[in-house]
Amino acid sequence: MALQKISTVTGRAVSIPSNDVDTDRIIPARFLKCVTFDGLGQYAFYDERFEQDGTEKLHPLNEPQYRNSSILISGSNFGCGSSREHAPQALYRHGFRAILAESYAEIFFGNAIMLGIPCLSLPGEALNILTKLAAKSPPPELIIDVASGSVTAEGQAFYGSLPNYAREALLQGKWDPIVDLLEGISLIRRLAEKVSYFRPENKAVHICNGGNSSYP
Amino acid sequence: MKKTLLDKVWEACTVRPLANGQTQIFIGAHLIHEVTSPQAFGMLRDLGLTVLYPDRTFATVDHIVPTTVAPFPDPLAEEMICALRENCAEFGIQFFDTSTGHQGIVHVIGPEEGITQPGITIACGDSHTSTHGAFGAVAFGIGTSQVRDVLATQTIALRKPKVRRVNVEGELAAGVYAKDVILHIIRKLGVNGGIGFAYEYGGSTFDSFNQEERMTVCNMSIEGGARVGYVNPDSTTFNYLRGRPYAPSLQQWDAAVAQWESFSSDLDASYNDTVTFQAEEILPTVTWGIHPGQSISIEERVPTLEELSIRDRAAAREALQHMQLKAGLPIKGTKVDVAFLGSCTNGRLTDLQEVARYLKGHKVKQGVRAIVVPGSQRVAAAAEELGVAEIFREAGFEWRGAGCSMCLAMNPDKLSGSQLCASSSNRNFKGRQGSPNGRTVLMSPLMVAAAAIRGEISDAREIFSVR
């Protein structure tokens, strides 16, 4: 499985300038009733963008100015809450290819990197300036360089950070680790033999046969 | 010496370091449910892979399962449950389906079945997997692609977290519970305070907690940003596990306990950070805002913007507007429309028993919809046997079947309009309980009961004369 090496992301940006943007906002739970991730893009930030009858609310993602944005700008602790991979999936399928925020919730960050979405951390002041730049007409292109962490717009450069493992994974096209994990199979089997008391053969009772008496 | 439980479990479960600096970590036990597994199995098939250790994965339905007796016809939900059934059958995975009598919320049944044990890593596609840390496991939520990784390799790629030791010392006052402890910790350390950390909880308060109280605290570690939260295992832990189906047999028991004890943090373990809270300072706590860190004690007033740091003001403004609360006024007396007792935070037997102790003789206020959702079929059965279920029904609570229910409202249990719900769950984000304008106030089970019978946010200690 050959993954794309991700060294730059270029595109227009849109800002959701709150802290603690949680995964229920990014994709409300009722849209998790699916067996594939297809079609999730239309539901990104649904309840802030649409009334219950489907009419559009005032929201940056609904503005023509920001249509076709591929870079999302936000605050600290972006993606907090659930581990639902549906959140970065919805953002990716909505068209986002990179996120610039002050900081990220850990599970969200890991999920996003695994999808090949660079998530750079920048100071609040830099994000404010980028937000203002993104609001110009016509909106400028931002260029994100994964190796250096630089974000350039209209000749101004800002510096963001990425944990080493994430930078390497994106640059080398190894952001989905399944191939690497599979290479460890013989070591996995060896470890499985030794690890802890939790082993299938130690089961006291097999549930299919009716189980045990009450024990909560 | 000098190692934390996290150090020891990490070492024991390290398969190998990966080129990018992460570690390939073996997962001792894997729990799956119907929401985050379908795509993982799909990916498995697309890659031509199979499940490496089917005996190490356990499945249940909890998020979308209806809690009413007659199933609500929701074709999407039906599709997801069928997908899980088929996937488990195909790969030989134990499925605690609704027909087994062992179904329930994934973080309730894991410990109940003795699957959750000290000294192992536990992963599940759900952020509240931190719950299992109450047993001295290193347990964490993972995304769907990582569910695929565990199914295919029984490992994931992960970075080792730092460890913050969180001590709570002293004795909790009457009417103050484990839920109040974790809400207090999150209030003080922040919803992002734990990013990059595992929280190791200890101190005399935790020593005296039972396993279900420890689970309540560990459950909400993720709301404080900490993906992992744990308590060192002790005799309380071992006594809970003895005799459970997947726990070691009696013949192996002593050896197992000795091995489990060896995982506890060394007395001279070094931590990246340490904080200490005094139990006596913790009061019954409720959230006033739109994330779990925005909380106050029942005796306080909703904060004014001036009282908050500049950083917190924008969020507070948004929160007050959504919650329709006035800054500077008491939160006590706020009208409650719905009361929800349940969830992986507070849906266990001792939660229900504690409420039942005080609830007997009281009635849910007219106009309030009160539901109690036991965390598992086993909890429900025990509650019936002990007469606890009857106390709830007598009081006017709807007694439901097991599931996640109104915590995230993926099943038919939802708020409507801008209803305000007194909830024993773990998240008060906007729209969390199924209505975009719905309002959630998090609190302990006894506080939920007090709100149900008064129809407003109340001090349970007063309502029930708790001493």
Image (cartoon, rainbow, N blue to C red):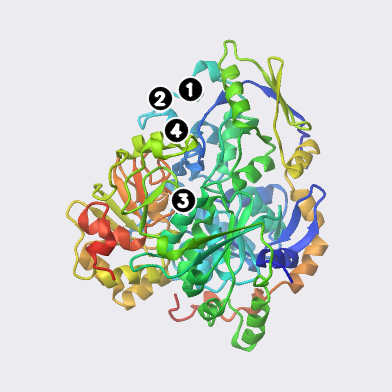
Residue B314, which numbered label?
Answer: 4
Disc 4 and disc 1: Cα gap in Å?
22 Å
Q: Are marks 1 and 3 in contact (CB under 8 Å)?
A: no
- Above or below, comparing residue A146 to residue B225 in the picture: above
Q: Nearer the viewer, mark 2 or mark 3?
A: 3
Q: Which mark is first along the chain, 3 or 4?
A: 3
Q: Amino acid at mark 3?
A: Arg
Q: Are marks 4 and 1 in contact (CB under 8 Å)?
A: no
Looking at this rendering, what residue extends furthest in the bottom direction?
Answer: B251
- Label 1 in the same subunit as label 3: no
Q: Are marks 4 and 3 in contact (CB under 8 Å)?
A: no
Dot 1 crowding, Cα within 10 Å, few <14, some 14–19, many 20+: few
Residue B301 visible somewhere in the drawing: yes
The residue identified by callout 3 is B187
- Above or below, comparing residue B295 to residue B86 in the picture: above
The residue identified by callout 2 is A57
Say which chain tag 4 marks: B
Q: Amino acid at mark 1?
A: Asn
- Label 2 in the same subunit as label 4: no
Q: Are marks 2 and 4 in contact (CB under 8 Å)?
A: no
- Above or below, comparing residue B283 to residue B110 in the picture: above
Disc 1 and disc 3: Cα gap in Å?
34 Å
Q: Are marks 2 and 1 in contact (CB under 8 Å)?
A: yes
Q: Nearer the viewer, residue B416 or A138?
A: A138
**What is the secondary structure assignment of the residue under circle 3?**
helix
Q: Position of residue B236 (x, y in %)?
A: 52, 78
Q: Position of residue B299 (x, y in %)?
A: 31, 54
Q: Nearer the viewer, residue B11 or B165?
A: B165
Disc 2 and disc 4: Cα gap in Å?
20 Å
